[in-house]
Amino acid sequence: MQSPAKEVVVDKTGRAPSIHDVAAHAGVSHQTVSRVLNGFVGIRPATRARVDQAIIDLGYRRNLTAWTLATGRSHTIGLVGPEKPDIGPLSSLHAVERAAREAGFHTLTTSSGPEANQIRGALEFMMSRSVDALVVIAQQESVQVAAEDTLGQMPVVQLLSGGQPRDSSVSIDQRVGVEVIMDHLTGLGHSLIQHVAGPLDFAEAIERRDAFTNYVSQHGLVELPVIEADWSSDAGYAAGEHIDHRATAVFCANDQTAFGLMHALADLGRRVPEDISVAGFDDTPEARHSTPPLTTVHQDFERVGQLAVAHLVARLDGVSPPSDVPLVPWLVERSSTGPLRLAGARASRLLNVRD
Amino acid sequence: MQGGIVTATRRGPSMHDVAALAGVSHQTVSRVINGSSNLRPETRDRVQAAIDELGYRRNMAARALVTGRTHSIGVLTPGEPNLGKMRSVHAVEQSARDAGYFPLVTSAAADSESIGKALDFLMDRSIEGLVVIAPHASVLDQVAKLDVDFPVVTLQTGGYDETHAVAVDQASGVEAAVAHLVAMGHNRIQHVAGPSDYFEAQLRRDAFEAAVVEHGLEVFPVPTGDWSVGSGYECGKLIAPEATAVFCANDQMALGLIHALVSAGRRVPDDVSVIGFDDIPEAAHSLPPLTTVHQDFEAVGRTAVAHILTQIRDAPIEPLPASTPWLVERESVRRV
């Protein structure tokens, strides 16, 4: 076994310089030092250079072997994902894996169904594998409850949980995402917009649905029934026959649903976007190449993964985690949405409906 | 704080802590934990009270030394994640859970050193069996060096070794795709290949070239993508004007390719037929819906886990037959 002592540089007080000493020397917060040490992007080069210089001046070194021996840490982050890996969970898990690897951590992933006994079993199993911290994809309430019960035992971050709990989750602002899509559609003249929701026991499906209905009532748009689907393109296809004949635009809760819906609309002889506009949510790689290419909302899963790891590393280092302000998604405008057309029979039918 | 007094060193309480609190030896604690019947009830109660008070969590690695059972199956996925790997991993996870095992998945960079380290890391986690997604020669080389006493199964190797490779018969899938195009009157078929360092990409390409010879088809250059929809779009720009059909090495590249063809004014399937490979859920809903070859990832996952469980139980193992993929006809192929 390596001797940890010989690699630690000790200052004249007889104490190895700490992360706080580096922070004081560089004139930055200890969180910033932690982020530099853990290789995170988004730090100004001048700041990074100051921290690097302080590290050299003080001979600071976070010796991983010593750290593991002293703390009993294994340098492993455990990930618990859902049994059915949709694009959001998969992208988030991969982003966490990459960020963890960059920060010098191993990852171990397991998966579980949402039933309380299943998820508790998976969390117990993961904690017994000597992991230092956990990332839990907590889309459903049963998973969130189980994950919160583990909080006293090790640092835990929840993802895709609708931003809950506030102090230990990393999230993307779903309301903003829905608003940018709805602003885009209303800006094109649409006021008859229907929503195909995700499964309504998923926090983010609920958030998107609520943001949609709030927007509709606040802007005085026509209320059309919300159709519930299950994130899959098959369910999007099935939703096609339930689209209200008055709707001129459809906002789907994810891209997969939108692909299936566009297929159904094509089968029904309705052109996208000439007859009806379709928008998605996520910005999957396929969205750029669907027929037509899909207007959607980009969720930055890479950043979610980086922030999740930054949060856990800060907690392990005993410093306060970076702020938990939700990330802001953005509109990606492609060809599946277009201006409202009120031509010929369709226009008169719409006008009759409005009368 | 719930469940557990954590000592100053942030280590969880150990079996020795439990023994000290209960005033018994650690062997006694161990016997209680492992359900030994030869204990006085009051001793058992005292140990259980100490376990509850300290929030002691049984270390599964230590327990495994005693019982030999951890009920976990390790899975290694090297390289960048892609849909094919993920579907295999998902199928293995599902089958492992169904069998009462926890899947324990770790990833690694694609180089030999990272793969070797990740294998060591998993083996330190007391797994009872190991599934390695081994699409590259570099991964198989590391697997070949393993000297372990638990069962190992490899996936996505194209079936190079029937003692531990669970495979889908790539050649028969390609033959089904090409035979379908030929039956629909095509003899100018171009192939878009996957990255050549993947066994399955190379096998599909080899099988395609063999079919070209067998059916006496025209020979075209083979653009190579990286499995992604974006690379399919780029390859789509390279399709020969005289080709009447394209066989893509996976569905995602086929989706990107269709976008490129349509953007260039070539209709699918009216002007060019397109066929994919995999049958991803979105293939049923692309425009036009994609004709493709279905790979049964779920069956592969079940077979892999069953093969491991058979060996754990010391039952006789049988050679692993490759599963046969099948053609799924949709609307992206037209008769000429």
Image (tube, coloured by chain):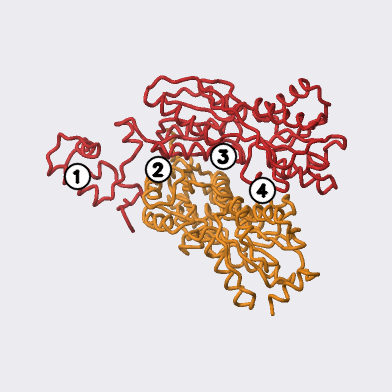
Chain colours: A orange, B red
Residue B285 disc label: 4
Q: Distance between the residues labelled 2 and 4?
A: 43 Å
Q: Is residue A138 above or below residue A177?
A: above
> Can you name the residue that lies furthest to the right here?
B241
Circle 2 SS class: loop
Q: How far apart are marks 1 and 2 (CA)?
A: 23 Å
Label 3 in the same subunit as label 4: yes
Residue at position x 62%, y 41% in the image: B82
Q: Which of marks 1 and 4 is nearer the N terminus?
A: 1
- The label nearer to you, 2 versus 4, is 4
Percent across and percent down for residue A320 are 48, 61
Percent across and percent down for residue A38 are 55, 50
- The label nearer to you, 1 versus 4, is 4
Residue at position x 55%, y 30% in the image: B155
Image quadrant of residue B248? top right
Label 1 in the same subunit as label 4: yes
The residue indicated by pointer 1 is: B47
Callout 3: few (<14), some (14-19), or many (20+) C-alpha neighbours within 10 Å? some
Percent across and percent down for residue B187 are 82, 29
Q: How far apart are marks 2 and 3 (CA)?
A: 27 Å
Amino acid type indicated by mark 4: His
Amino acid type indicated by mark 2: Ser
- Please, which chain is the residue tagged with disc 4 on? B
The residue indicated by pointer 2 is: A130
Residue at position x 71%, y 63% in the image: A277
Circle 3 SS class: helix
Q: In this view, does B7 lie above or below B226?
A: below
Q: Can residue A10 be seen in this view?
A: yes
Circle 4 SS class: helix
The residue indicated by pointer 3 is: B87
